[in-house]
Every structure is written in structure tokens, then in C-alpha cells.
Image (cartoon, rainbow, N blue to C red):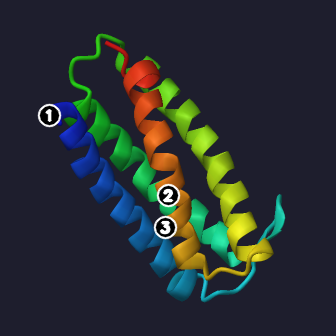
Amino acid sequence: MDLQTFRYLALGGSNMLLDIFFYFISYNFILDKEIVYVPVFGAISPHIGAFILAFSITFPIGFMLMKSMVFTESVLKGRIQLFRYFSVAMLNIFLNYALLKLFVEQFGFYPTPSKILTTAVIVISTYILQRSFTFKS
């Protein structure tokens, strides 16, 4: 395993654990497993609200870790990297949303294991996209 892959796994894994931790705290304690009413969007289920809260914390942390410690050889400007990272994150948000809805509402899985399973499904494709698109060298 090369150093870049190791760093991606270690730092990305740490950020993923942080995401799952914030998701758990948000779902169980901040939102207290209750539906969230947002004026513009209406009612949001607690597992989706917890996802949004966790994402708002771990997105900037993840970008800084990937930019400064994993994909350091990239010659792209920081703002281009951020835009591309955000684009990949939007794809991940769509996949997270769809898979969480599927696992929790259709299959009846518990929310936190559903989040863990969803994250596991997305990790490999994200690494490929980050390496070949976001932080292209």
C-alpha cells in the first residue's frame, strides 16, 4: 500500500468516524429522534436532519485533511479543488440520502447502522474520484 492510500484510509477513516459520531449525537440527542420542521423545506426526518448536521461539520474538515495531508502533489488551485471536492460531496449527499431513505424507511434498519453501511458503500468510489478528479496531479 502506498503512502497516499494509507493516508487516505487513516485520515478519511478518522473523518468518517467523526461523521458517524456527529450523526449519532445529532440523531439521538440534538434532534432527539424527532422530525425537524424547516420553514423552506418543511418536515425533515430525524435521520436526514442528523446527516445534514454531521455533514456541515465534517465537510470542511475532510477537505482540509485531503488537500493538506493526502493529495499534496496536486497542482490545481485550491478553489478548483474545493469546487471539485464539493461536487463529489454533492454526489455523496445524493447517495447518502437515497441509501439512508432506502435502508431506514424501506428496509427498516436502525439509523446508525444504516449510516455506517451507507458510508462503507461510498468510500471506494470517493477515493477514485478524489484521486483522479478533485486532486488530480
Does 27 sit left or right of 25 as displayed?
A: right
Q: Quadrant of the N terminus?
A: top left
Q: Is residue 125 above or below residue 72?
A: below
Residue visible at 36% across and 46% down? 62
The amino acid type found where label 1 is placed reads Leu
Residue 116, which numbered label? 3
CA distance separating discs 2 and 3: 5 Å
Q: Secondary structure at mark 3?
A: helix
Q: Image quadrant of residue 15?
A: bottom left
Mark 3 burial class by Cα count in 10 Å: few <14, some 14-19, many 20+: some
What x and y, as percent, mark residue 108? 72, 81
Look at the image and tell me whether residue 55 can be seen. no
Check if mark 2's residue and mark 3's residue have beta carbons within 8 Å.
Answer: yes
Residue 4 is situated, as x and y percent measured from the top left of the image, at 20, 32
Which mark is on residue 3? 1
Q: Amino acid at mark 3?
A: Ile
Identify the mark at residue 119; answer none if there is no mark.
Answer: 2
